[in-house]
Amino acid sequence: MDLAREHGLSTQAIRNYEDAGVLPAAGRTVHGYRSYTPLHAHALRAFLALVPGHGHQTATAIMRAVNRGADEDALRLIDESHGRLLDDRRTLQAVEAALRDLAPVPQERGDTFIGPLAGRLGLRPATLRKWESAGLVRPRRDPRTGYRVYSAADVRDVRLAHQLRRGGYLLEQIAPLIAQVRSAGGVAPLESALRDWQARLSARGRAMLGGAAALDAYLRARDP
């Protein structure tokens, strides 16, 4: 099948894309074989171009909407995806701003407990306990009650972990970074991670541009 060969895909993958609504329904020959046209090629190119910027699930939803004639739904999905990218950019900026302000904490003040801290950050207390087990934060225990007590330095570490998790980093990647920040009192250990994060966001943005161009070409071919 030319459509499959052009993109290095199997014929079964093409059938699966059609069944999933990624491609418009194919015509049938008199012998019952599926017949794909240049319009299907435009649709496949659009889908494959959308995936790097929007992810497979969102790209599939966009193409399904387009192929059922719900263009406004497709555009809304694209807008929402761009909104998530913008949120991630703002998160990165917040991390960079937080790191610029990092300094050794000479006097630990403003102690807090797990419930108020979790509520402030929109997390569950169980998440903070998990981060503690992973070595991201080391709150002391109140000797009388046994409750976890988070110092200003602990809150800083939790805040950094929260931002990096939103940036897509795994706990095992974050733990050594925070340990270095904790010991060095500076931001140098995170500089390469932030550069990588920025590069990934830029790549997503560029991929979204490519996906938009390919989708526009499909829409033009569909509605000449």
Image: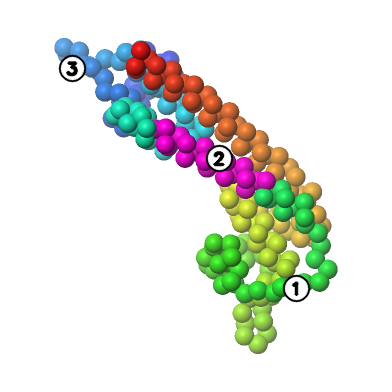
From mark 3 to mark 2, how far is it between C-alphas?
44 Å
Question: Would you name the residue on which mark 1 appears?
Answer: 109
Q: In the rendered image of this protein, does residue 162 appear above or below residue 28?
A: below
Q: In which quarter of the image is the C terminus?
A: top left
Q: Give the label, 1 or 3, closer to the camera.
A: 1
Colouring scheme, one of rainbow, by chain, secondary structure, one colour: rainbow
Magenta stretch?
74-93
Q: Would residue 128 be found to the left or right of residue 3 on screen?
A: right
Q: Which residue is drawn at 69% across and 74% down?
A: 111
Task: Name the amino acid, label 2.
Answer: Leu
Are circles 2 and 1 on residues that touch, CB within 8 Å? no
Is residue 167 depicted above or below 140 in this figure?
above
**Residue 1 locus on image (x, y percent):** 34, 14
What is the three-letter code of the residue carrying label 3? Gly
* Mark 2 crowd level (few <14, some 14–19, many ≥20, 10 Å Cα): some
Q: Specify few, some or many for label 1: CA neighbours under 10 Å numbering under 14, 14-19, or 20 or more.
A: few
Query: If you read the primary sequence from the N terminus, does the residue marked by circle 1 or circle 3 appear first?
Result: 3
Residue highlighted by disc 3: 32
217, 166: nearer the viewer: 217
Residue at 83% over, 68% down: 106
Height in image: 114 above or below 146?
above
Identify the mark at residue 85; answer none if there is no mark.
Answer: 2
**Residue 198 vertical placement versus 215 (above, below):** below
Q: How far apart are marks 1 and 3 (CA)?
A: 76 Å
* Residue located farthest toward the bottom when viewing the structure as drawn: 144
Snapshot quadrant of residue 209:
top right
Contact, CB < 8 Å: mark 1 with mark 3? no
Amino acid type, mark 1: Arg
